């Protein structure tokens, strides 16, 4: 790998501005790295060589004219394949959308194109973003950059791996219950899920609309801040997006954590947590305490209910959102059928994988008239309790730190026969989506098997600045490992 790919966005942008390298050269290097690494990594579903080089050429013109508006201009990146890209196949890693070419760009793509960013390709995920290992992709199994026999996490496994394998400088993922933070933790990169509403979901293929958010994955905290300020903002096409004209996340990152109150919820450090991960996360907390943060023991006792509530709400919404794939309007249609109903049935049977079917069935069940009150309504009540619990804890503290995941990345195939085991990987991340809060996973060491550990920094609604600052401060004192 070329040393160039160890550079931060800030450093590489300097090189581009000083003409030490052109965007076309940089993009060629990224494409070379992809060709070299992909046979093992399998992070990409589509590599857009021609478009990327054309974008790079345009970026070089903008840079030469001195009109570059963004620090991201000319820098190669990758996008999760559930984010619509005009004229470029967007599959959601599903047979259902294997040949789907969107006629429009997602809002985040419009913003990145406006910044003259260079998209080198679309990256792998669990089918329709349902999963925690990227093994649910119809197309391929992405590998973990630290151990090729292990999963990269999911569902944004391709987004995390493409950064971890240094194929690109940053990527976009989506997070419904942990899908940015968990793969970031497994692959040793930084991943940020923004507050619900900060980034437009227009053009993100819907999984669970009340939980989905797009966010960045990158090598360091500042890079994530640069991407976030580029993609944030109100969009009339997503009624849940909010005005964030003050979206400046990168300035003031060095201001430190003196006097900042950081809450440590005891429920997140219980017996189901791998002791090595516990040690690494608590060491990071100690390091922040040395920098002047005040550490406060808190309790978030609704943790036990978060996972069942999440899987009920997200599956209910998924069953409704995925009803549109009927063999008529979008995507795959079965070749042979006897009637209209038979065509619907066969198209969905053949077009969707097992996990997606499981969620659709679960979601349809919890929404059915006899069970609605017992499951869906109850889960919504639990959602309110979880939200209230976080809001009241945030009267005591400015940020909360937990592990991102209870375990290190597991081996490919280890959990495929046991969906409940797989769901348990999301135990620390789902409540953040339920409450709509921002949270970021930052690498904080490695286990004895040399696998990365991530700590999760959770903030108040729209207070990305504080969590970025905590992560940045930690990065400066962390050293390398
Ligand atoms: N692993 C979780 C799930 O399968 C989260 C997925 C996500 O955030 N997209 O639902």
Image (cartoon, grey):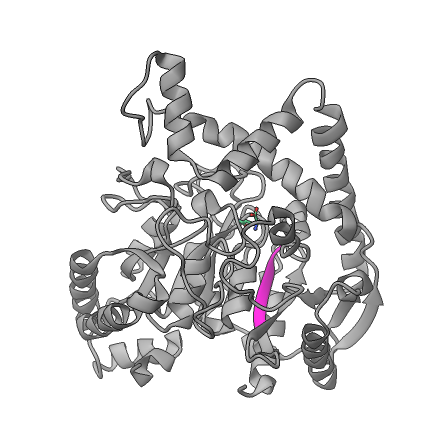
Give the residue furthest to the top. Answer: 339
Location of residue 184 with respect to 295 vertically, above or below: above
Q: Nearer the viewer, residue 220 or 189?
A: 189
Could you tell me residue 123's position as x and y percent? 36, 56
> Is residue 229 visible from the viewing direction of this image?
no
Residue 263, visible in the rendered structure: yes
- Judge by depth and name the residue closer to the eye, 177 or 24: 177
Report the number of discs.
Answer: 0
Q: Looking at the figure, which quarter contains the N terminus?
A: bottom left
Q: Is residue 186 positioned above or below 462 on the image?
A: below
- Residue drawn 55% across the image and 75% down it: 451
Q: Position of residue 164 (x, y in %)?
A: 42, 71
On screen, 205 above or below 25?
above
Image coordinates for residue 475, horizontal then vertical, percent: 56, 80
Q: Position of residue 38 (x, y in %)?
A: 30, 66
- Residue shown at 33%/22% (left/top)? 328
In the rendered image, residue 184 lying in the magenta stretch gets the answer no
Q: Is residue 117 left or right of residue 437?
A: left
| Magenta residues (range) | 437-442
For this view, does 172 lie left or right of residue 246?
left
Determine the image quadrant of residue 59: bottom left
Q: Seen in the image, is 260 located left or right of residue 84? A: right
Could you tell me what secondary structure mostly forms the magenta stretch?
A: strand
Q: Quadrant of residue 345?
A: top left
């Amino acid at each position: 790998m070329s040393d160039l790919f160890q550079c931060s966005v800030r450093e590489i942008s300097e090189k581009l501005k000083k003409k030490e390298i052109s965007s076309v050269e940089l993009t060629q290097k990224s494409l070379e790295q992809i060709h070299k690494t992909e046979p093992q990594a399998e992070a990409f579903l589509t590599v857009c060589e021609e478009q990327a080089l054309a974008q790079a050429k345009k970026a070089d013109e903008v840079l030469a004219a001195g009109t570059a508006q963004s620090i991201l201009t000319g820098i190669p990146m990758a996008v999760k394949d559930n984010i619509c890209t005009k004229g470029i196949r967007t599959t959601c890693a599903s047979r259902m959308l294997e040949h789907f070419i969107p006629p429009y760009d997602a809002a985040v793509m419009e913003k990145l194109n406006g910044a003259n960013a260079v998209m080198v390709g679309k990256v792998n995920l669990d089918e329709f973003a349902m999963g925690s290992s990227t093994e649910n992709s119809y197309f391929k199994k992405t590998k973990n950059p630290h151990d090729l026999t292990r999963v990269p996490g999911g569902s944004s496994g391709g987004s995390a791996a493409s950064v971890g394998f240094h194929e690109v400088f940053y990527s976009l993922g989506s997070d419904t219950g942990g899908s940015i933070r968990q793969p970031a933790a497994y692959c040793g990169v930084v991943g940020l899920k923004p507050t619900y509403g900060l980034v437009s979901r227009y053009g993100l293929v819907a999984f669970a609309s009340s939980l989905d958010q797009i966010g960045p994955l990158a090598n360091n905290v500042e890079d994530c801040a640069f991407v976030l300020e580029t993609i944030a903002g109100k969009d009339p096409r997503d009624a849940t997006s909010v005005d964030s004209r003050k979206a400046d996340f990168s300035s003031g990152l060095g201001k430190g954590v003196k006097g900042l109150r950081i809450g440590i919820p005891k429920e997140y450090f219980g017996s189901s947590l791998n002791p090595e991960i516990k040690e690494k996360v608590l060491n990071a907390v100690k390091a922040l305490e040395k920098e002047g943060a005040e550490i406060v023991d808190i309790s978030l006792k609704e943790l036990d209910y978060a996972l069942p509530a999440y899987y009920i709400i997200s599956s209910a919404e998924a069953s409704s959102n995925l009803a549109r794939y009927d063999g008529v309007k979008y995507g795959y249609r079965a070749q042979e059928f006897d009637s209209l109903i038979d065509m619907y049935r066969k198209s969905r049977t053949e077009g969707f994988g097992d996990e997606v079917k499981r969620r659709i069935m679960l979601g349809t069940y919890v929404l059915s008239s006899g069970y609605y009150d017992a499951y869906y309504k109850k889960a919504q009540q639990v959602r309110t309790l979880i939200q209230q619990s976080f809001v009241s804890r945030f009267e005591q503290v400015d940020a909360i730190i937990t592990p991102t995941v209870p375990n290190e990345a597991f081996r490919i195939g280890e959990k495929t026969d046991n969906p409940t085991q797989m769901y348990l990987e999301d135990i620390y991340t789902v409540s953040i989506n339920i409450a709509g809060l921002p949270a970021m996973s930052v690498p904080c060491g490695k286990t004895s098997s040399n696998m990365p550990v991530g700590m999760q920094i959770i903030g108040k609604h729209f207070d990305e600045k504080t969590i970025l600052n905590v992560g940045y401060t930690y990065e400066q004192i962390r050293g390398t490992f």
